[in-house]
Image (cartoon, rainbow, N blue to C red):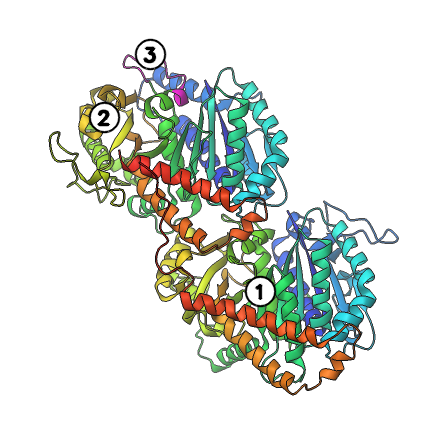
Amino acid sequence: MTQSVVVQVGQCGNQVGCRFWDLALREHAAVNKKGIYDEALSSFFRNVDTRSAGDGPGIYKGKICSLKARALLIDMEEGVVNEILQGPLRDVFDSKQLITDVSGSGNNWAVGHKVYGCQYQENIVEKLRKTAEHCDCLQCFFVIHSMGGGTGSGLGTFVLNLLEDEFPEVYRFVTAVYPSGEDDVITSPYNSVLAMKELNEHADCVLPIENESLFDIVNKIHQMMNSGKLGSTVKPNSLVTSSAGITKAVQEKPFDAMNNIVANLLLNLTSSARFEGSLNMDLNEISMNLVPFPRLHYLVSSLTPLYTLADVNVPSRRLDQMFSDAFSRDHQLIQADPKHSLYLACALLVRGNVQVSDLRRNIERLKPSLHFVSWNQEGWKTGLCSVPPVGHSHSLLALANNTCVKPTFMELRDRFMRLYKKKAHLHHYLQVDGMEQSCFSEAVLSLSDLIEEYNELDATKGGPRADPSRLKIAV
Amino acid sequence: MSLVTVQLGQCGNQIGREVFNAICSDVHGTHGLCSKKENESYHDACKERFFIEAESGVPVARAVLVDMEPKVISQTLSIAAKSGYWKYDDHSHFCQKQGSGNNWANGYTVHGPRHKEAIMNLVQKEAEKCDRLGGFFTIMSMAGGTGSGLGAFVTQCLRDAFPSSFILNHVIWPYGTGESSDALLVHENDVIHKICAQLMHMKQISFKDVNQVIAHQLGSVFQPTYTAEDGIHYSRNPLGDLMETLVPHPEFKMLGLRNIPQMPENSLAYSTFSWPGLIKHLRQMLIANAKMEEGIDWQVQPPRPGSSVPSSHSTNKLLHFNTSIANLVILRGKDTHSADLGSFRDPSLYTSWLNPQDAFSAWKTPRAFNKYEKSASLVSNSQFLLKPLDNVVRKAWNMFASKAYVHQYTKYGIEEEDFLDSFTALEQVISSYTIL
């Protein structure tokens, strides 16, 4: 069994991360009735004997003593991390897993990346090493941060660089939250584009998320709940947005529902690696199958179902509906419509009581309405995990490598250019040691190249003009 | 003689488990519809071939389980042990912590060399436990990283370590041929799935169902039979006999498997079959390249001698009529001695290389298999697999021409040259089978 480490950077990263740990504990608690520290738990948690002084060596088998998350929490302001440490999850984190400062990055990528990066580099590396040492077989780093701010985007991408240098063989999955059009941070386009260059070059896989999409999904659920259209009652803890975790939050905070969606995404992504199934899909397989060209590693994700009705019976129809929904525009976690763009590859991670015949039937049904690149007409990667998420009998996570990310990136570039042409706010960045104008021009070039690659694919539908002629054998 | 099974990757291990299950349940559960003495002979031959008698009385499968990640192996070991009828040796497995990531190069260039010694040690141990080693039976999928990549590497190691033993690779499509193995027995998931849906009337088909069908088909071939006409003893060298009858030339070693009848278990009691009927169907399945006993195209007939040469020489058109190099039919059950297999000896079914009497062999046993009163299997070295192979190569070539995914392989040391070599080899095989 392999282990993964979560690195959460900045306010957004830490808030999402917090929701992830809460839900992960709930999920394992539902499955692990005997309180034994098993392999599934060890993928994300250490089992520590806190009675012994100091660090406490890890306990590898037997009863659960005290679970510690395999995580690194980094923020240049104290507020968010402090709140976590005072909240119900305080025992899940080791004080040695935190790196905080006081004044924050002022929404400035350069401060996050160059100033704090430099300042905390050694500290970060040391803590990463420690966490890695506690792992038997470290497979993957999950980095969570926003793109629009200063710490998440700047320091977050700095850490990404470090991960590549220090642990080149370990996969780097980044969950990046992109700013929406009406973002309240004016310099978010600068921060995002500067961070994009780093993601292009140093991440193995990126799961872009847009706040706007999360918001729409949350609203949709509220509408459904309040409209009374649903015949039966909705199981409350089945909501993809619910916080019914170990923390019984009486009053949910504004971003909690949205963050829960992202947390569920990560849980589903790693489910096959943690639990058993008839067709396992490990994280390295996701990267292998979904990334045909090294730079095109942006995966559009969608989660279904959003809630489960209290009916116990699940007729095929509902199962099929789950598959259809995964491809609809409203279930995507970024503002994109994969159905009308070109697929390079697609992965379906199914959890719960679903058989291979259901999977095949649905793929056959949906295939005609989807456009796949010519050389990957059957570019479907599937995984079946037998353990469903809490409150559901089955669920589906779809990951698409699809050219529908292009508009998101093009808009980002446009917003960047609007500011950059007027040199607005540039001085805040340039006055940071190590920042030059060329950083900006290189970053936007990197983004443009990426957009160009997607354009190329769209234009040629991914294939050469005619079927390439096969090798001829002399008879 | 005993067979050592090497199960590779998730697919290989899941199928391997079903195969041993099928063999065990055939031996224990069913009556066999023959004399007690016959039954005992069968029982003993089967035991020797696949199991070792342990002190506890529970037979231990002669198998080595290999996977690069631990979940499937631990599941396989525990499910087997729970059955109470048989189990695996607790030490006969090898696994690592992290899989091969669906990457052939990872399985072949990284995991292979790294773990060669450990794996071969386990194989050696199993081989030594055999009084007489009949050969190796490896099971793997071709689509994953461990099965295909590590599988190819292990096959080569087996060949190096046991140069005179027979090696039969059982592969689940989609790609690959092997240089080191003596023969490749291929199963396509799509085909098995159809069998489950149409013949077995399964509504919700799981991998377990698919694997059970595969296991039934494999069992029908490898359970003991008499190979000589005056069978007194059960054949002692199944793999060797198989190779001898079916693989006259190393360039032609792709074998397809058909088994009839296949039906849901609860229909068995109500069905009766006759040998002429079964044989007729099986022959037409061969000629028309049908995958199962429904939907056979009865129009297709072998060319009559003296008629114009069919379009078999155009390399792009794939034929309707399935030419065979050699065939083996295995009959199990009541009254096999009365079954007339003359229609399979028709020379027009075969290429002209072998004498018609050498091109066809039959193995029989009066002992019924797995509750089927009569069952017939066909192992065929023919153009069965030409179309699927051609499809797979076409898709792979398209991908390669667009340079898709190539970087994932080059980072493990596989160069474009290596890809080209593989393509060339496969095109050679396709060409050879096309012009039969």
Quadrant for residue B217, please give it.
top left
Q: Residues within 10 Å of mark 1 (few under 14, many from 20)?
A: many
Task: Give the quarter of the figure containing the C terminus of chain B.
Answer: top left
Q: What secondary structure prevails in the magenta region?
A: loop
- Name the subunit of mark 3: B
Q: Is residue A228 above or below residue B344?
A: below
Tell me if A346 is positioned left or right of A47 in this view: left
Q: CA distance from mark 2 to mark 3?
A: 33 Å
Q: Is residue B273 above or below residue A121?
A: above
Q: In front of the other: label 2 or label 3?
A: 2
Between residue B407 and residue B333, name the one nearer to us. Answer: B407
User: Please, what secondary structure does the residue beneath circle 3 have?
Assistant: loop
Between residue B58 and residue A406, name the one nearer to us. Answer: A406
Q: Is residue B238 magenta?
A: yes
Q: Residues within 10 Å of mark 2 (few under 14, many from 20)?
A: few
Numbered mark located on residue B352 in the image: 2
